[in-house]
């Protein structure tokens, strides 16, 4: 195994360093490579044991690709995915072969977005949830049955359900089944890709509560990929915001929501419709659209949509800098800007706003 | 028929808008399947006044989309409108017609659909034909329905329709409209595609616009743009909108009046501020509590609604919400179905906590 070093047990459970994933764009008769989609472009972060890191961003920002690289469901183009094993060795998952990865697979599991597509409809719950056990060498059926019963109980389902098929269950129940399957091998790190976004509001709260409970009782570490900021805020210890394949901000949850340091983060927070008709977010709207990761803009990727953009932002790509302890942002102007509560980012920028109808800038 | 608030009201501009544009009364739609009958919409009543935005909110299976389809007479077999009225006050004639009685493929319905009542669907990718340019599809709609553009009632030439489309594209914030009009839907981004869809829906100056989760498939920053656009166009054209969504945030920001549905029935309805700040039905209260807020404590246990949405074949007896309700009254709620009853002006609730009236068994 490509073991790098033996670390102390307080080292991060996961460290992603300079992760890149480029997808080739093929053109013409001979499938000539005409360029690359830079889906993930130099992403670095750490995740401590027992922590939840929320990974947010809009579609195409590379959050799911990052998650898949961690799981080695796809092969990273470049960079390291350092994982601290149970024996406190630090290993790089990125260059490992399938055989080398196999023993580590049980430690890192995934919860999927779609509770309808991610369970095999022809398999009973016992087979769906028990399959990871079988793959990981639990051959005796009796033993698997006991474990599946225990897992179903753990996620709040009755063990008698194990002989039923997934179609008999609602979306929320299926997501519980998916969680039970992810926990079958007693993983240490769980990557959850939009685990509640397909669920109804009343069920979403139940699943979020379940994830929090399981995390504290099983000492799980979560990488939680989502686009819903209120959900991410609720569940995460720290939040990483991605935009066009890059991390633009990384900070503790309280810090980033109180005082976002990147204009994109602030705009993203403002764009969430507030479930209160007395709070109007109507006029603080980010113009334009997310650029394609195949041909990102020059300089700072956010500059075409940023109201604070200066000449320098057009030319020079900013680096991710630490502005306060643990609070990183990728913005040239981060020190000068006061974003967040009560400011008027992008007010008046919407081309569709009626004049003379300005409402209060939305409070964050 | 359930009693419904009959309120006189004037809109924000002081005009008398006594007469609702649309009155849905005790609408019922069921689907006869081999496994049994699904009562997808089971006694829904609400009004839509001119220029008003009515939000219909509810979780999956609550019947919000089926209600929308019933208004447009787009229910396909084995579904059927079994009873109720959909009273629409037609523009030119000012006479009220019951859409529920019209043959779905008849001339009358075809003339209303797209012209007076337009739809913005959830998935613009699926709604546009991929083999025609978006411009062609909108031009076709204008030429088919666009009497509104020509007072003399004559048909519109292709060239005029194209000019109208370019203007519409500019109106909905599509840059370079002259070029984009010749694009295919798959060449446009999600946001542009939804803007083009809105242009198409507005192309015949509808009096009633039905928006079925128009931003669900779109990212938040684009969603904010689309919502702002809809709000602005609504003010400009004074179109009445029925806005269907599961997102309470979107409802709070878009609607004047809110209808909360659960399992095919209206739980409560009222002005948006009342629904969010003085909800009366236990379901609405629980729903509002269960969304993680952008201000509250993090990593705490969220208040939940216990249990799960029942399977459509397995409808609970009595009040459909009773198995999940914290305030359930064992003998009453399990046995009888509460009627949607007016509790104040513009305010109706169907819950035995507020009125003892039950549907006839």
Image (cartoon, coloured by chain):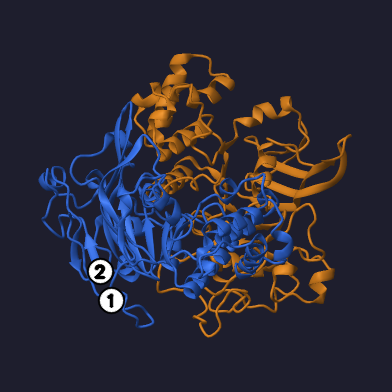
The answer, for residue A252, to whether it is visible in the render is no
* Crowd band around label 1 with a 10 angstrom C-alpha radius: few (<14), some (14–19), many (20+): some
Please name the residue that numbered disc 1 is placed on. B9
SS for callout 2: loop
Image vertical order of residue A58 relative to residue A259, above or below = above
Q: Nearer the viewer, residue B26 or A190?
A: B26
Chain shown in blue: B
Question: At x 68% / y 51%, what residue is drawn?
Answer: B133
Across and down, in percent, residue A319 comes to 78, 64
Give the Cα separation between the discs numbered 2 and 1.
9 Å
> Is label 2 or label 1 in front?
1
Q: Chain of mark 1?
A: B
- Confirm or deny contact between disc 2 and disc 1 (CB under 8 A): yes
Q: Is residue B79 left or right of residue A125?
A: left
Q: Is residue B345 left or right of residue A116?
A: left
User: What number is the disc on residue B346?
Assistant: 2
Q: Nearer the viewer, residue B179 or B332?
A: B179
User: What number is the disc on residue A11?
Assistant: none
Q: Chain of mark 2?
A: B
Residue extending farthest to the bottom is A356
Point out the image quarter for the N terminus of chain A: top right
Q: Nearer the viewer, residue A302 or A250?
A: A302
């Amino acid at each position: 195994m490509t073991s790098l070093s033996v670390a102390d047990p307080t080292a991060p459970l996961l460290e992603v360093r300079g992760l890149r994933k480029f997808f080739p764009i093929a053109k013409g008769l001979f499938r000539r490579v005409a360029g690359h989609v830079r889906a993930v472009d130099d992403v670095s972060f750490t995740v401590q044991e027992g922590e939840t890191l929320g990974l947010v961003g809009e579609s195409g920002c590379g959050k799911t690709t990052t998650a898949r690289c961690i799981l080695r469901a796809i092969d990273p183009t470049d960079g390291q995915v350092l994982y601290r094993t149970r024996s406190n060795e630090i290993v790089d998952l990125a260059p490992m072969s399938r055989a080398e990865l196999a023993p580590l697979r049980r430690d890192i599991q995934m919860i999927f977005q779609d509770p309808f597509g991610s369970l095999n409809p022809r398999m009973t719950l016992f087979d769906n949830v028990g399959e990871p056990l079988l793959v990981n060498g639990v051959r005796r059926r009796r033993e698997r049955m006991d474990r599946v019963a225990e897992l179903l109980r753990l996620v709040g389902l009755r063990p008698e359900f194990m002989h039923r098929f997934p179609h008999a269950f609602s979306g929320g129940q299926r997501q519980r089944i998916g969680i039970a399957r992810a926990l079958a091998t007693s993983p240490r790190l769980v990557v959850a890709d939009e685990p509640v976004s397909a669920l109804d509001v009343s069920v979403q709260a139940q699943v979020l509560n379940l994830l929090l409970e399981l995390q504290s009782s099983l000492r799980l570490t979560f990488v939680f990929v989502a686009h819903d900021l209120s959900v991410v805020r609720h569940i995460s210890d720290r939040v990483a915001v991605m935009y066009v394949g890059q991390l633009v901000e990384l900070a503790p949850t309280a810090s980033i929501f109180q005082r976002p340091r990147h204009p994109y983060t602030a705009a993203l927070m403002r764009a969430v419709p507030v479930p209160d008709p007395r709070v109007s977010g109507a006029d603080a709207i980010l113009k334009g659209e997310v650029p394609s990761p195949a041909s990102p803009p020059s300089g700072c990727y956010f500059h075409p949509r940023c109201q604070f953009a200066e000449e320098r932002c057009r030319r020079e790509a900013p680096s991710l800098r630490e502005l306060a302890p643990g609070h990183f942002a990728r913005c040239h102007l981060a020190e000068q800007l006061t974003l967040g509560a009560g400011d008027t980012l992008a007010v008046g920028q919407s081309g569709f706003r009626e004049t003379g109808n300005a409402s209060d800038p939305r409070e964050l | 028929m359930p009693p419904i608030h009959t309120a006189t009201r004037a809109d924000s501009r002081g005009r008398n808008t006594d007469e609702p544009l649309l009155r849905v009364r005790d609408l019922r739609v069921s689907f006869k399947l081999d496994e049994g009958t699904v009562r997808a919409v089971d006694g829904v009543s609400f009004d839509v006044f001119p220029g008003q935005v009515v939000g219909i909110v509810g979780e999956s299976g609550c019947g919000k989309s089926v209600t929308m389809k019933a208004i447009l007479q787009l229910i396909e077999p084995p579904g059927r409108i079994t009873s109720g009225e959909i009273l629409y006050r037609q523009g030119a004639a000012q006479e009220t017609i019951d859409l529920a009685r019209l043959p779905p493929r008849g001339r009358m319905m075809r003339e209303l659909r797209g012209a007076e009542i337009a739809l913005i669907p959830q998935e613009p990718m699926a709604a546009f034909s991929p083999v025609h340019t978006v411009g062609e599809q909108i031009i076709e709609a204008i030429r088919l329905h666009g009497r509104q553009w020509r007072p003399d009632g004559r048909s519109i030439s292709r060239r005029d329709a194209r000019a109208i489309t370019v203007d519409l594209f500019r109106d909905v914030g599509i840059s370079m409209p002259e070029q984009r009009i010749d694009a295919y839907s798959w060449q446009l981004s999600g946001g542009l595609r939804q803007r083009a869809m809105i242009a198409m829906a507005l192309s015949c100056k509808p009096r009633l616009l039905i928006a079925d989760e128009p931003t669900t498939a779109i990212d938040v920053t684009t969603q904010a743009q689309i919502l702002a656009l809809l709000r602005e166009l609504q003010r400009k054209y004074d179109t009445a909108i029925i806005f269907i969504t599961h997102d309470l945030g979107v409802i709070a920001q878009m609607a004047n009046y809110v209808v909360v549905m659960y399992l095919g029935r209206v739980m409560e309805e009222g002005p948006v501020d009342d629904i969010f700040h003085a909800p009366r039905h236990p379901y609405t209260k629980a729903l509002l509590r269960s969304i993680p807020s952008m201000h509250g404590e993090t990593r705490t246990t969220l208040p939940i609604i216990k249990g799960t949405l029942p399977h459509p074949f397995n409808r609970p007896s009595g009040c459909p919400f009773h198995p999940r309700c914290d305030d359930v009254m064992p003998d009453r709620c399990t046995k009888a179905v509460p009627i949607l009853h007016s509790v104040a002006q513009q305010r109706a609730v169907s819950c035995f906590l507020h009125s003892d009236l039950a549907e006839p068994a």
